[in-house]
Image (cartoon, helix red, strand yellow):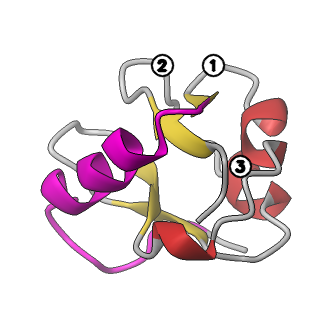
Amino acid sequence: MPKRLPWVVPEYCEGCTSCVGACPKGILDMRESAEETPIPWLDDPSGCTGCGRCEESCPFGGIAMTAHVEEATQRFADRRPLRKESVGVR
């Protein structure tokens, strides 16, 4: 598991997909959510390297890297998006 994981801030995400394109592992994807805008999502947080490129690429502050890896992993597990179909483009 990485030392840092992305923490998605849905209120700031504009659904631009820049974070998806910045992920060197290609594991960040856009998913439909309870919010009206698709948000970045990790289906498998253990595949993340914690590099922070997703955070750096976001012009809106929709992703912040956190050292609270266990909490972030649990958040991805508990707050699954409503639909799994991808809406972003890699």
On the rendered image, what quadrant is the N terminus found in? bottom right
> In the image, 80: left or right of 47?
left
> In the image, 52: left or right of 35?
right
Q: Of label 3 and label 2, which has the lower sequence position?
A: 2
- Looking at the picture, how far across and down is residue 61, in whole percent? 63, 19
- Looking at the picture, how far across and down is residue 88, in whole percent? 56, 66
* Mark pair 1, 2: CA separation: 6 Å
Query: What residue sits right under mark 3 in the picture?
Result: 19
Q: Quadrant of residue 16?
A: top right
* Mark pair 3, 2: CA separation: 13 Å
Dots 1, 2 in contact, CB < 8 A:
yes
Residue at 61%, 76% (x, y): give it.
Answer: 47
Residue at 22%, 36% (x, y): give it.
Answer: 35
Q: Quadrant of residue 22?
A: bottom right
> In the image, 21: left or right of 15?
right
Q: Name the disc covering residue 12, or none.
A: 2
Three-letter code for the amino acid on which mark 3 is drawn: Cys
On the rendered image, what quadrant is the C terminus found in? bottom right
Is residue 82 part of the magenta span, yes or no?
yes
User: Residue 13, relative to residue 60: is it above or below?
Assistant: below
Callout 1: helix, strand or loop?
Answer: loop
Name the foreground residue: 16 vs 40.
Answer: 40
Q: Which residues are magenta?
A: 66-88
Three-letter code for the amino acid on which mark 1 is drawn: Gly
Residue at 44%, 58% (x, y): give it.
Answer: 41
